[in-house]
Image (spheres, grey):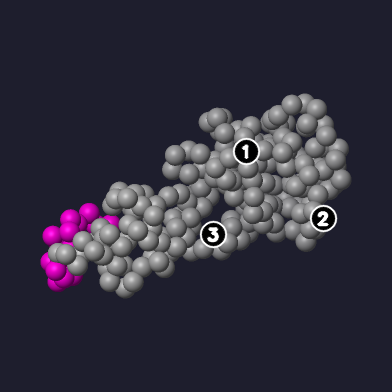
Amino acid sequence: MKVETIKQQLLTASKALVPAERVCIYAVDTDMSPYDHMTDGQDRRWVQIYPQFRDIDPFHPRYFAQNPNSVFCTNDAGGPAKHRDTFIKGFRQAMGISYKAEVFLRDRHDRICAGIRFSRPHHMGDFQEKEIATLNLLQPIFSNAWRSALMETNEQSVIELLTDREKEVLQCMQKGLPNKLICRELNVALPTIKNHVKNILRKTGTTNRSEVIARLHAA
């Protein structure tokens, strides 16, 4: 399943389970910066405005990277108070938003790798304890879905580089088979298998079998 597909599914499921005027899902890069936002709302004004305020966003992932929790609501905002005030007045109020709930998704190393943001105007009221509890229950499920999509995307990007025979060799490598057993499995001479392995490493930019497998499962 592609990342874009899982993003759309997570948006749909999120809003069905916890009502909000707008739900937005985004990826987080290795510098803890959010990018590639997708929203379910029709109001697209925020797309042009948000980049001006992203670095002072009180729910920027960098403020929560070391926090063991993954679900936060309006009063949990981080960062300097002056930045929070600027963000609220310049962005949130301009968009008619009063209340927020943030769900950070984490990779297998517990690093924030994505986020889902729920936004409500004043008339919908703040997020209640029961709704926050629901988001806490959903967070591991959403994180697993995101990781699975990333792993599938990574695996597909690697496989697309290989010939059909190299793909067969890679499957054997994933099973942990050494070259001699791959020879028997595929009925191919050992020097040929060694050459295929060498090509796989070259094409994937890795130096050994472990790195190839790690790249396939990097999520």
The image shows residue 94, relative to residue 72, as above or below, that is below
- Please, what secondary structure does the residue beneath circle 3 have? helix
Viewer-side residue, 178 vs 43: 178
Give the spatial CA distance, label 3 vs label 2.
Answer: 24 Å
Quickly name the residue at label 1.
61
Label drawn at residue 147: none
**Left or right, residue 59 beside residue 135:** right
Other-residue count near label 2 (Cα within 10 Å), few / some / many at <14 / 14–19 / ≥20: few
Give the spatial CA distance, label 1 vs label 2.
Answer: 22 Å
The stretch of residues the image draws in magenta is 174-189
Give the spatial CA distance, label 3 vs label 1.
Answer: 20 Å
- Please, what secondary structure does the residue beneath circle 1 have? helix
Which residue corresponds to the image point at 76% horizontal and 54% vertical from the top-left? 47
* Whether residue 124 can be seen here: no
Quickly name the residue at label 3.
3
Which residue corresponds to the image point at 86% horizontal and 37% vertical from the top-left? 89
Quickly name the residue at label 2.
45
